[in-house]
């Protein structure tokens, strides 16, 4: 999310400042000459892995859950502007793990 001491920080539940998800293997890096102590590559659009927990159905919108930086199903949550992490591209049911999501196109 945007905010905190640095430009970006780990998103917390109910945040309305979500901008994407951390990307380990980006296809394209903008501002690749950026310098700093905590430079993190964030996916703003595309298909990327995302940490999730709980029951998630393929196609469902995701929001940040009670575990900071981990997405959950948006079922029963207010999904106003800035709260959506992405859309699930696969089903999930269980503890924290990675699934593919679509960021930036809802």
Image (spheres, helix red, strand yellow):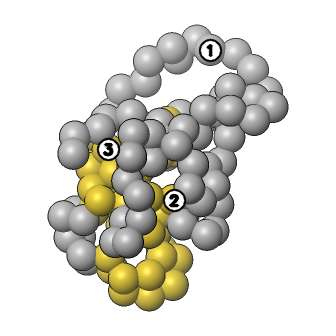
Judged left or right of residue 14, residue 76 is: left
| SS for dot 2 | strand
For residue 78, above or below residue 81? below
Image spot of residue 6 (x, y percent): 75, 29
Comparing marks 1 and 2, which lies closer to the viewer? 2
Q: Count residues near mark 3 (Cα–Cα under 10 Å), then give few for <14, some for 14-19, many for 20+.
A: many
Comparing marks 3 and 2, which lies closer to the viewer? 2
Q: Nearer the viewer, residue 5 or 79?
A: 79
For residue 86, above or below residue 46? below
Which numbered disc flags the more N-terminal residue, 3 or 1? 1
Image spot of residue 2 (x, y percent): 61, 32
Q: Residue under circle 3?
A: 103
Q: Residue under circle 2?
A: 64
Q: Nearer the viewer, residue 16 or 101?
A: 16
Q: Could you give the CA–CA distance between mark 3 and mark 1, rounded to whole angstroms?
A: 22 Å
Residue under the point 29% across and 59% down = 61
| SS for dot 3 | strand
From where the camera sits, is residue 79 visible?
yes
| SS for dot 1 | loop
Q: Could you give the CA–CA distance between mark 1 and mark 2, rounded to whole angstroms?
A: 27 Å
Q: Count residues near mark 2 (Cα–Cα under 10 Å), then give few for <14, some for 14-19, many for 20+.
A: many
Residue under the point 54% across and 66% down = 65
Q: Are marks 3 and 1 in contact (CB under 8 Å)?
A: no
Image spot of residue 71 (x, y percent): 47, 63
Residue under the point 51% across and 14% down = 31
Q: Nearer the viewer, residue 14 or 27?
A: 14
Q: Could you give the CA–CA distance between mark 3 and mark 2, rounded to whole angstroms?
A: 13 Å
Which numbered disc flags the more N-terminal residue, 3 or 2? 2
Residue 34: which disc?
Answer: 1
Which numbered disc flags the more N-terminal residue, 1 or 2? 1
For residue 10, above or below residue 56? above
Residue extending farthest to the bottom is 94
């Amino acid at each position: 999310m945007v905010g905190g001491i640095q430009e970006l920080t780990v998103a917390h539940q109910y945040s309305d400042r979500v901008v994407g998800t951390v990307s380990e293997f980006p296809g394209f890096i903008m501002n690749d000459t950026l310098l700093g102590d905590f430079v993190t590559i964030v996916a703003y659009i595309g298909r990327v892995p995302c940490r999730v927990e709980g029951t998630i159905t393929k196609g469902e919108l995701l929001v940040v859950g009670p575990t900071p930086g981990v997405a959950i199903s948006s079922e029963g949550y207010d999904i106003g502007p800035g709260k959506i992490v992405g859309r699930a591209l696969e089903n999930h049911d269980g503890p924290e793990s990675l699934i593919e999501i679509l960021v930036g196109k809802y």
